[in-house]
Image (spheres, rainbow, N blue to C red):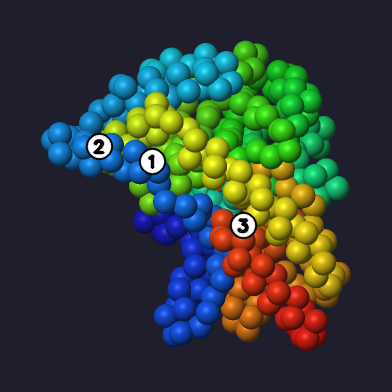
Amino acid sequence: MLQTIAAFDRIGEENAFAVLARATQLAAQGRDIINLGIGQPDFRTPEHIVEAAIKALHDGHHGYTPATGILPLREAVAADLQKRFGARVSPDEVMIMPGGKPTMFMSILMFGEPGAEIMYPDPGFPIYRSMIEYTGATPVPVPIREENNFAFSAEETLKLITPRTRLLILNSPANPTGGVTPKTEVDKLVAGLERHPDVAIMSDEIYDHMLYDGETHVCLLTYPSIRDRVILLNGWSKTYAMTGWRLGYAVWPGRLYDYARKLAVNLHSCVNASAQFAGLAALTGPQDAVAKMVAEFDRRRKVVVEGLNKLPGVSCKMPKGAFYAFPNVKRTGWKAKTLASSLLEDAGVAVIGGPDFGILGEGYMRLSYANSTENILRALERMGDFLASRKAA
Ligand code: PLP
């Protein structure tokens, strides 16, 4: 019992949800809040996807599905990975999950225990570290550096591997930095990983459609030499603006698939049936809504970065993926979290302080540009006024 309590005390949080709650509270009090905090597209789910879910309900898909997901959807995921990246995936390796997060939960649970080391990006999605700590494993941060355009460095990553390393978590395009690790660097990393056959890799590719400036996505499943130890995390949340549907998928190596299936049976039984039909329509239907959304994010990306670079003490690299900007605010004199909370309380702009994504996040803030250009411009103006008129606290 005591051990359980101790483990639960180690679980962390995603502060973006706390910021969202505070922003909503302030808005309810009548304040005009511009939310650049939460990481979800500000678009509606495309209509044909919504219709597919409604049809599934009318057609009577009201019961449990297999724990691993309906076969047509698993087939569609495999076909999509083959079509987009040339990855050879069997539908029997695909598991439909209630969102992207549960794949990180399950894979960290499978590899984490006291004495084990799990490597994760810092700054990075906060749930990685939270779950590693929960299992009692040692979290080993992999530094993600601005001077490296927020890409993974193969050399630095490989140096951190020890005989205790069980799992390496990768994320590109990345939250919170928008960084994209180039193929040359992934190639180097994979070549190095061939010398460490006992290290599994969990590749979080949830932003794989959101790439700019002609970048192409590198799917870790396409490397035969490590294929049998790659877990792919992906899903519909970001690509199809479906964060509230709770629909994701994993590709598990053979030996892990059955563990994941058992965890699913113990945890959620199966994913909401009508959402799975919606996911099927998303993958097999027209993709123009995705292209439109990405083009719109691309336009806003330029607006937000240009505006940030004009603010006193702020500099911002052009992100190559996802829908986040990660400006450096060190020269403002503010601590990043103090600045973020003051911007919300005093200027009505919700952003997330970099330290919420790891120790190396100090001196940075995350802005999600999943908001209208008009709101982004208003937020930038407010931030400019705030920085010009307020002394660092
Ligand atoms: N992975 C990364 C890097 C994310 O940024 C997010 C969501 O913000 C997720 C996974 C979780 O996605 P989902 O909402 O599908 O659980």
Of the image marks 3 and 1, the number of the one nearer the N terminus? 1
The label number, if any, that marks residue 247 in the structure image: 1
Which mark is on residue 273?
2
Which of pointers 2 and 3 indicates the residue nearer the eye? 3
Determine whether 178 is above or below 172 in the image.
below
Gap between marks 2 and 3, in whole Å? Answer: 32 Å
- 59, 162: nearer the viewer: 59
List x then y, in percent, for residue 350.
59, 70
Tag 1 secondary structure: loop
Type of residue at label 3? Tyr
- Badge 3 is on which residue? 369
Measured as percent of width and height from the top left, residue 268 is found at: 29, 41
**How far is mark 2 from mark 1, CA to CA?**
10 Å
Res. 268 in view: yes
Residue for point 61% across, 66% down: 374
Q: Residue at x 25, y 28 (%)?
A: 66
Q: Amino acid at mark 1?
A: Leu
| Mark 1 CB lies closer than 8 A to ligand 1 | yes
Residue 150 x, y percent position in the rendering = 76, 45
Q: CA distance from mark 3 to mark 1?
A: 23 Å
> Which residue type does callout 2 highlight?
Ala
Query: Mark 2 touching mark 1, by CB under 8 A?
Result: no
